Amino acid sequence: GQQLNQSPQSMFIQEGEDVSMNCTSSSIFNTWLWYKQDPGEGPVLLIALYKAGELTSNGRLTAQFGITRKDSFLNISASIPSDVGIYFCAGQGAFSGGGADGLTFGKGTHLIIQP
Amino acid sequence: NAGVTQTPKFQVLKTGQSMTLQCAQDMNHEYMSWYRQDPGMGLRLIHYSVGAGITDQGEVPNGYNVSRSTTEDFPLRLLSAAPSQTSVYFCASRQRGLALNTQYFGPGTRLTVL
């Protein structure tokens, strides 16, 4: 099946720093989604991208849908303590046949903010 | 409007026991899915349903059964629990025909099988 490579696996940063993470795939995707998961909670959608080249912002978060449709990145500017959590990318494949949504998830980027 | 609810929040089972994880949504969503999340892994699809009476297998269906007798409920059954099923289970739902950004996840059920 389709696989997503999400990196980095974890990040240790200082409060106020900018953060960048990305997902790549060998397959083309029609949609990219970025989720955040807080401890003990389910994933919450941050940004959805529907067109190649699309750049979308949500507050301090910015995400882009790669031109090749095989990658996406998420940037967080001026990180704050509440940004701590696990960030997941998810893609809906061009030829997805499995699942109600045909979503494939990355393994997550664990963001840790050091005081 | 409670969104997607899951019960129980935590559960400990012994190997071989059976149990049902409950999932309900009050948004009249047609699509519902069950995922499992293991340490260092993304979410993997177990089973899904595109409407009442319709279910299908996802990526990791073995050891799990589902049914969808109503639009609101989508229970996940473990017939004979195994330690490999220790995981966090998430239910999700969304309305067919709308964009993926309308999908909602429940808070999860943390299952330990001894």
Image (cartoon, coloured by chain):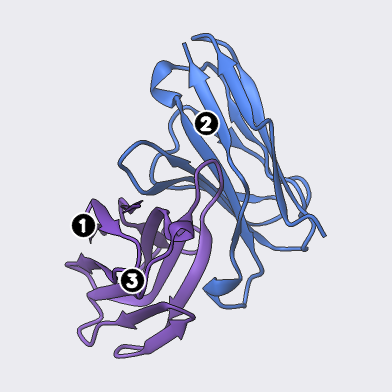
Chain colours: A purple, B blue
Q: Helix, strand or loop at disc 3?
A: loop
- Residue B71 in the image: x percent, y percent? 76, 55
Q: Mark 2 near mark 3, Cβ–Cβ under 8 Å?
A: no
Relative to B69, is A33 above or below? Answer: below
**Which residue is under mark 3?**
A95
Give whichever of A3, B87 is nearer the camera. Answer: B87
Q: Earlier in the sequence, mark 3 or mark 1?
A: 1
Chain letter of mark 1 equals A
Residue A7 visible in the current orientation: yes
Identified by mark 1, the residue type is Pro
| Mark 2 vs mark 3, CA separation in Å | 26 Å
Relative to B94, is B84 above or below? Answer: above
- Badge 2: how crowded within 10 Å, few (<14), some, or many (20+)? some
Chain letter of mark 3 equals A
> Who's the residue at 77% across and 63% down the image?
B27
User: What label does residue B34 carry, if any?
Assistant: none
Identified by mark 2, the residue type is Tyr
- Residue B44 in the image: x percent, y percent? 40, 46
- Residue A60 in the image: x percent, y percent? 43, 78
Residue B19: which quarter of the image?
top right
Q: Residue furthest right?
A: B1
Q: Quadrant of the N terminus of chain A?
A: bottom left
**Which residue is under mark 2?**
B64
**Which residue is under mark 1?**
A8
The nearer-to-camera label among 3 and 1 is: 1
- Badge 3: how crowded within 10 Å, few (<14), some, or many (20+)? few
Give whichever of B85, B9 is nearer the camera. Answer: B9
> Who's the residue at 66% across and 69% down the image?
B95
